[in-house]
């Protein structure tokens, strides 16, 4: 019998958000009349604006005309889109060439696949709690993982790794804690990585939620980062493309061979993002498109404020929710996070994400997402206020 990859046996049985969906569905089946409010997975809910929609429709229309039809696109993604992304970085004071940018179908696959360009013996460091994709992809690859605790004592930003590691994954604004790294915090890691010849994988999927000008939106705002960091980002949360699928990864030329390796990996195992989605992305990056998308981002951030204010008034301890769409709530009365999941669902009919699902140090916390229709967010907060027995 052919052997399966036994590293899969080391993973939790189901992916976190699949588990939550399963438990929620089971509760709904038992309580069919209950209206469940979902603040669990960070899934966008608000419709696209006319500018981005026009881009997507225009992309589809091109396909019905023999003169504008296209099949496979440019190798690393549409040249126009990569130039538009380079121009976007330029506004942050970051100079990138289109050849350093790889368009993809989203940040999730890129954060999962990037490990493949590194030696399997490289030890990786990830935060705990962490977006499970970095952990699970490296478990599947059979790598040794070092966990960096992120707690309220270090403002949910890790200390430098104590042992020798080749790769560190950082995410800011952070999923799940909603903490946003300062320039000084990122500089510490960039300097460490350059000194130790390590690589930082920086997940910037939520960078568009940063409105505070003092906070960095790209790791390349930190001097020296192009020598040690790969940045992965996404149109999902910024442009509402969770279902459309579009993202990008920056592998600077200063990282030497890694740019060519990622190109090799992508051209072998990926055939490019949808040409329609890329037209939508181009529209989203136009000045008017950015304005349109940022309006929706502000809408979600207003949701975050409503949730935070409501819970704080109840006496709960809440982190995040500022410059980030996630709120990290300390579970009351020392409840473990899955018990709080059950309690919140059964008493207030609200779904969130148990912190333990993101790692050991997530225990005792609970993540709420600000992605949702305003009426549902308000109803969820009201229901928590009224029905949650604290
Ligand atoms: C989350 O809820 O953590 C995110 O929606 C997951 C993702 O973007 O893949």
Image: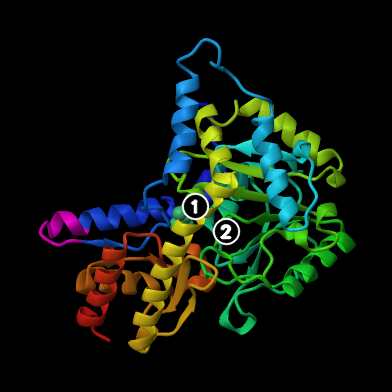
Farthest top residue?
66
Numbered-mark total: 2
Q: Which residue is mark 2?
A: 208
Give left or right: position of 333 versus 325: left
Q: Is residue 28 magenta?
A: yes
Residue placed under numbered mark 1 in the picture: 293
User: Measured from the top left, where is residue 154 in percent x and y?
Assistant: 64, 80
Work out which residue is located at the far right of the displayed protein and give it.
Answer: 195
Taking the image as shown, residue 45 lies to the left or right of residue 247, namely left
Disc on the earlier residue, 1 or 2: 2
User: Residue 236 at what x, y percent from top left?
Assistant: 50, 48
Asked if residue 367 can be seen in this view, the reply is no
Residue 204 within the magenta-colored segment of the rendering:
no
Position of residue 143 measured from the top left corner of the image (x, y, whole percent):
67, 50
Residue at horizontal 85 percent and vertical 59 percent from the top: 224
Q: Hey, which residue is sitting farthest front in the picture?
A: 288
The answer to whether residue 151 of the structure is visible from this angle is yes
Q: Secondary structure at mark 2?
A: helix
Q: Is residue 77 above or below residue 158?
A: above
Give the residue drawn at x 54%, y 73%: 361
Query: Would you place residue 38 above or below residue 181 in this image?
Result: above
Q: Secondary structure at mark 1?
A: helix
Left or right of 231? Residue 130 is left
- The residue range painted magenta reads 27-35
Name the residue located 37 percent from the left edge and 52 percent from the top edge: 46
């Amino acid at each position: 019998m052919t052997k399966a990859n036994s590293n899969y046996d080391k993973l939790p049985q189901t992916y976190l958000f699949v588990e939550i969906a399963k438990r929620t569905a089971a509760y709904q089946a038992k309580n069919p009349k209950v209206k469940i409010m979902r603040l669990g997975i960070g899934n966008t809910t608000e419709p696209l604006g006319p500018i981005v929609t026009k881009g997507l429709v225009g992309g589809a229309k091109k396909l019905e005309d023999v003169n504008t039809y296209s099949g496979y696109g440019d190798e690393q993604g549409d040249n126009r889109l990569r130039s538009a992304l380079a121009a976007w970085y330029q506004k942050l004071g970051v100079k990138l060439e289109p050849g350093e940018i790889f368009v993809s179908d989203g940040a999730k696959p890129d954060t999962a696949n990037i490990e493949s360009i590194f030696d399997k013996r490289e030890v990786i460091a990830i935060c705990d709690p962490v977006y499970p994709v970095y952990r699970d992809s490296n478990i599947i690859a059979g790598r040794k993982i070092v966990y960096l605790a992120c707690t309220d004592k270090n403002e949910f930003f890790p200390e430098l790794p104590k042992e020798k590691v080749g790769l560190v994954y950082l995410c800011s604004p952070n999923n799940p804690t909603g903490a946003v790294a300062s320039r000084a915090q990122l500089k510490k890691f960039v300097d460490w990585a350059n000194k130790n010849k390590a690589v930082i994988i920086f997940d910037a999927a939520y960078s568009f939620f940063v409105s505070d000008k003092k906070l960095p939106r790209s790791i390349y705002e930190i001097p020296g980062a192009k020598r040690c960091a790969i940045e992965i980002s996404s149109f999902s949360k910024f442009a509402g493309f969770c279902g459309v699928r579009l993202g990008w990864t920056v592998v600077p030329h200063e990282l030497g061979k890694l740019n060519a390796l990622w190109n090799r990996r992508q051209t072998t195992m990926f055939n490019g993002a949808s040409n329609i989605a890329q037209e939508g992305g181009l529209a989203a990056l136009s000045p008017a498109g950015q304005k349109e998308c940022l309006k929706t981002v502000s809408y979600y951030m207003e949701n975050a404020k409503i949730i935070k204010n409501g819970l704080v008034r109840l006496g709960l301890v809440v982190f995040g929710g500022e410059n980030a769409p996630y709120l990290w709530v300390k579970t009351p009365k020392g409840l473990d996070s899955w018990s709080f999941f059950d309690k919140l669902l059964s008493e207030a009919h609200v779904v969130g994400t148990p912190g333990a699902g993101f790692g050991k140090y997530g225990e005792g916390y609970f993540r709420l997402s600000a992605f949702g229709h305003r009426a549902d967010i308000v109803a969820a907060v009201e229901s928590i206020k009224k029905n949650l027995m604290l």
